[in-house]
Amino acid sequence: MICITGIGIVSALGIGVDANRSTLRDLRSGIAPVRFLDTVHRDLPVGEVPASDNELRSLLGLPDDWAANRTVLLGKLALREALSSARVKDKVRTAFLNGTTVGGMDRTEQALCDILKGAKAAPDVALHDCGATTCAIADGENHWELVSTLSTACSSAANAMIVGAELIQSGRVDCVVAGGAECLSRFHLNGFNALMILDHQRCRPFADDRAGLNLGEGAAYLVLESEKTARARKTQVLGYLSGWENACDAFHQTASSPDGEGAYRAMTGALRSAGLSPDDIAYINAHGTGTPNNDETELAAMHRVFGSGLPPFASTKWLTGHTTSASGSIEAAFCIMGLNAGFMPGLSVKPAQSLRHVLCNSFGFGGNDTAVVLSAPDAPPAVTPSVASVDRPVLVVEAAAQISCQQPLSDAWLRTPDLCSGPVARTVDPNFGEWISPAEARRMGLLLKRTLTNARRTLGEAGISVPDAIITGTGLGNIEDSEQCLLSMLENGETSVSPTRFMLSTHNTFSSLIAIATEAHGYNATYSHRGLSFESALADACLRLRRGLAGNVLLNAVDGMTDNCYRFLCSTGELGLPEQYPASEAAASFLLRAVSPDEIKDKIMIIGHRLFHQPTAYELGEAVRDMVLEQGAPFETIPVVFAAYSGVAEDFPYYGAIFSDIFQELRPAYYSRFLGVSFSTPALAFYMAFRQMQSIPGQVGILLFNNSKSGASLTLLGKNMVLL
Amino acid sequence: MKQQLKSQIIEALNLVDLKPEDIQDDAPLFGEGLGLDSIDALELIMLMEKNYGIRLSNPAEGKAIFRSVGVMAEYISQNHTK
């Protein structure tokens, strides 16, 4: 049972739970003309948080020169309120899962032109990517067991909540602070404008004369914890996260399918996992953006689920605007307020029956559809969300493909990989025409082609046509399209942005592209957490396989490096450092499967995988010992540790001390020397380990280790080990 | 005019495997035709604005205009401002 014990929120309705609750009850809309965003589109109303950046800093007790983007400021305010309302103390093992897509784009779009002319980036611009934004929100607020970032466009916050719930049920942590944060940016205002789905008046979700959405901004986090922890801490329970499901529409990057297949699957799955029937739901907080397409297909899906018994429903986006990556947790927070105070968010009518269970929808680009069931404090879920009974499955890697600066189609390079060279190592691309038809390829840049090629090769090797789940890690997302969008917007003074490129600019484009190509309607997630993006995706894959939520997972990683991107990252101090190995691009896919212990002969098993946030050497040592003990074989069977060290002297303490303290006899292999430095390079190391172990007969293990300021991970792969 | 428009459509939508002569004047652009979708319609709206100074404020208006290259060329010749 997942208890909700704390809420923090900022939105156009106000700052803090009390302000939001009273404005929400009174149905006072926060949609108004632009006040703070520096845009030419003054005719487009928005839902801005009613405070300037410096007013937000002052609320946080931070000086005016404290480096942050607006997403960080909004996120920090909501996070502090959530932590203090739940009285989370350092003694509880707590994770922070943040959903964002825009990240620090508000600062980047102001600074980029000067940076490309050679200026040095100010410290706030270095928080551009989603993971850096998350870390800046998290830093200094709590002791975190692990921190990561989900980026599935407008469903990001809802997905952070469901991954948080799974993480608690797996026992990895006791408590998760989950939600999302997103500020307005000119980038996505112009992008949505290019899609011609912005209403020039206040939006009217589900109305016959609806004409599009209004963008909003904000942040909200829910504190989730197990019943046991909540009881032990004697914390007040505000409600329950009783059921949840993510599904993929697998139809189109931006349009929903006519019958709302993804939305239907998400809603029915959430009800099933809560052990409830449609009759139990007293209110639906719909995604309800106000666009003709969303509302029509969402309504079609609701009719499919509820038939003639459709309960009262409303969208609260005419009050807050569409707060994109933060909308899932903002609207879940509204539902909890309604459950506690007996009102239905967005509706003036009083509930006919007492509110016990409500449904909250959150849909994103790429057909990423999530629904959650929230229950009142006096209506705990009757059942724990069901987990298929799998007898302690063993996780194996069955197939893989990679595209990098090494040869893509043959593994001959693995014996003696060439050191990579240049400021940016050149990627060796295969002939994509073998895997992608010209009609499919017409909108694809290199990153999308690499992703789909790797996915098809991997699925082909594994003999699978439709994967159960698709999970991707990408530090920077689809930079080819997002960069072109941004540059055209800056160059022509916000007059024209390509709708095609904006549609493809979200980080989850890779996962959705594969889902559409394979018609995969299952779980679809994307992690954008700097150098720990792939390992975050791997952790989610392991969680789902171990809990029987998927029989197989297609796991991907992709990051690119355009000339402009390289210049940008040099100016922020990320790349181009003395002694640093060359920058590079990386793309890889893997097919992971859960098998029974009698099927593991000669298979490459994932024996252990664990994420950390700023761990001590002692914690890492304990984790390695646990993993080695689990495989029931001595340390000697692990000849090598693949380590993500990038060559920069100041990062060496993250690796050097660890090797001398805990790995001792193990030989480190610093793989970035021949794979280059990219947020997704750890996926290439995983590929190397997988293929090398396949070619070694008998018993063998390889440890993979990644340590940085944004997080750390340990992965132990083994072959022909006896698992204890 | 129609030839020029066909080239512009091919470029805007990156229809790399098509030549202008492959597109019939009266063949439907959407649906079964070239396999275009709602995002392509938005690109065509941008094309008309950029090259012919025609602004559509409601994407639904595009439906009738983009029936075929012939219909689109007719609309442009009557409404262009540059």
Image: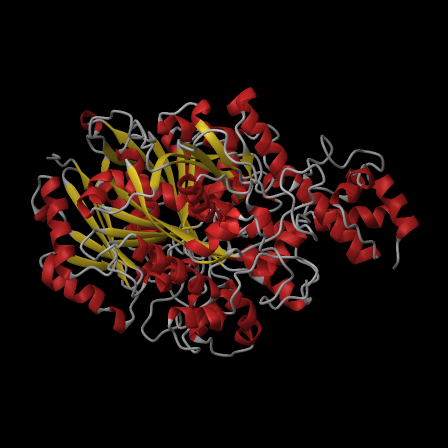
Q: Residue at x 52, y 34 (%)?
A: A249
| Relative height, residue A548 to residue A361 (above, below) | above
Q: Is residue A408 visible?
A: no
From the viewer's perspective, is A609 left or right of A492? left
Q: Residue at x 33, y 62 (%)?
A: A419
In percent of width and height, residue A141 lies at: 30, 63
In percent of width and height, residue A184 lies at: 55, 60
- Name the image quarter holding the C terminus of chain A: top left
- Name the image quarter holding the N terminus of chain A: top left
Q: Nearer the viewer, residue A17 or A595?
A: A17
In percent of width and height, residue A551 lies at: 33, 29
Q: Residue at x 45, y 53 (%)?
A: A428
Q: On the image, which quarter does residue B82 sit in?
A: bottom right
Q: Nearer the viewer, residue A89 or A236?
A: A236
From the viewer's perspective, is A292 left or right of A620? right
From the viewer's perspective, is A197 left or right of A379? right
Image coloring type: secondary structure
- As drawn, which residue projects farthest toward the right? B78
Q: Nearer the viewer, residue A163 or B32?
A: A163
Q: Is residue A681 visible?
A: yes
